[in-house]
Image (tube, rainbow, N blue to C red):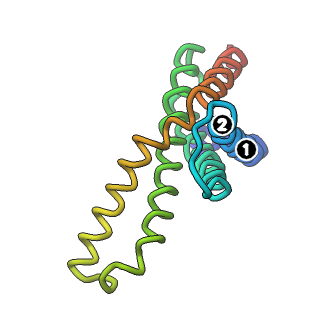
């Protein structure tokens, strides 16, 4: 397998990541303002987390999509885009959320690299990921999901 197969065109990779990050930030903002899912006073920070999750999700997912869907039928391309881009975007956003959560609680934790610190790191991260799964994924629905479907259909049609 050559590098050309799993590396997308640089402009598509770079500008697409910015556009997808902005789309996920827009999904969050639509969720809190149009659908009334208020989050409190941290809307700017959360918007940045969703934008960063979209950006990182795109950068990681696109090479994976190219490996899975390169030269395949449009149905495989559609499935690859929907599954991989959707899951990686959610995972990247949850990871950034967990990092911010850990940063907030770090000053109450035990000293670095101790056994207690390891427990605290593990459970803080687990709680953050659970909280994101319960409260955070809803901000990607329905707007983010609709954008994912539209993008996947357009790319699958172009692959014919």
Q: Position of residue 139 (x, y in %)?
A: 56, 38
- Identify the residue at horizontal 58%, vertical 34% (top origin): 66
- Measured along the vertical axis of the image, is residue 137 above or below residue 158? below
In the displayed image of the protein, which residue is found farthest to the left?
A: 115
Query: Which of the image's four quarters has the C terminus?
Result: top right
In the drawing, what numbered circle is on residue 22?
1
In the drawing, what numbered circle is on residue 27?
2
Residue 107, located in which quarter of the rendered image? bottom left
Residue 106, located in which quarter of the rendered image? bottom left
> How many numbered circles does the render carry?
2
Q: Position of residue 129 (x, y in %)?
A: 39, 51
Marks 1 and 2, Cα distance to the nearest angstrom? Answer: 9 Å
Foreground residue among 91 and 119 = 119
Q: Position of residue 39 (x, y in %)?
A: 57, 48
Q: Within 10 Å of the Cα at label 2, are there few (<14), some (14-19), or many (20+) other Cα atoms?
A: many
* Element assignment for label 1: helix
* Element assignment for label 2: helix
- Identify the residue at horizontal 77%, vertical 45% (top origin): 15
Foreground residue among 74 and 28 = 28
Foreground residue among 114 and 85 = 114
In the drawing, what numbered circle is on residue 30?
none
Q: Within 10 Å of the Cα at label 1, are there few (<14), some (14-19), or many (20+) other Cα atoms?
A: many
- Identify the residue at horizontal 28%, vertical 70% (top origin): 120
Of labels 1 and 2, the one closer to you: 2
- Identify the residue at horizontal 55%, vertical 41% (top origin): 61
Could you tell whether 43 is left or right of 135 in the image? Answer: right
Q: Position of residue 27 (x, y in %)?
A: 66, 36
Q: Earlier in the sequence, mark 1 or mark 2?
A: 1
| CB-based contact (under 8 Å), mark 1 and mark 2 | no
- Measured along the vertical axis of the image, is residue 125 above or below residue 104? above
């Amino acid at each position: 397998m050559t590098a050309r197969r799993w590396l997308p065109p640089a402009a598509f990779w770079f500008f697409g990541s910015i556009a997808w990050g902005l789309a996920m930030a827009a999904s969050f903002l639509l969720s809190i303002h149009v659908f009334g899912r208020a989050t409190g006073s941290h809307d700017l920070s959360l918007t940045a987390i969703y934008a960063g999750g979209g950006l990182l999700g795109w950068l990681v997912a696109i090479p994976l999509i190219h490996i899975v869907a390169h030269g395949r039928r449009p149905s495989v391309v559609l499935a690859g885009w929907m599954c991989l881009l959707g899951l990686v975007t959610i995972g990247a956003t949850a990871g950034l959320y967990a990092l911010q959560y850990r940063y907030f609680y770090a000053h109450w934790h035990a000293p670095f690299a101790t056994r207690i610190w390891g427990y605290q790191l593990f459970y803080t991260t687990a709680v953050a990921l659970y909280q994101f799964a319960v409260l955070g994924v809803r901000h990607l629905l329905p707007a983010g999901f609709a954008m994912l479907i539209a993008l996947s259909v357009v790319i699958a049609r172009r692959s014919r």
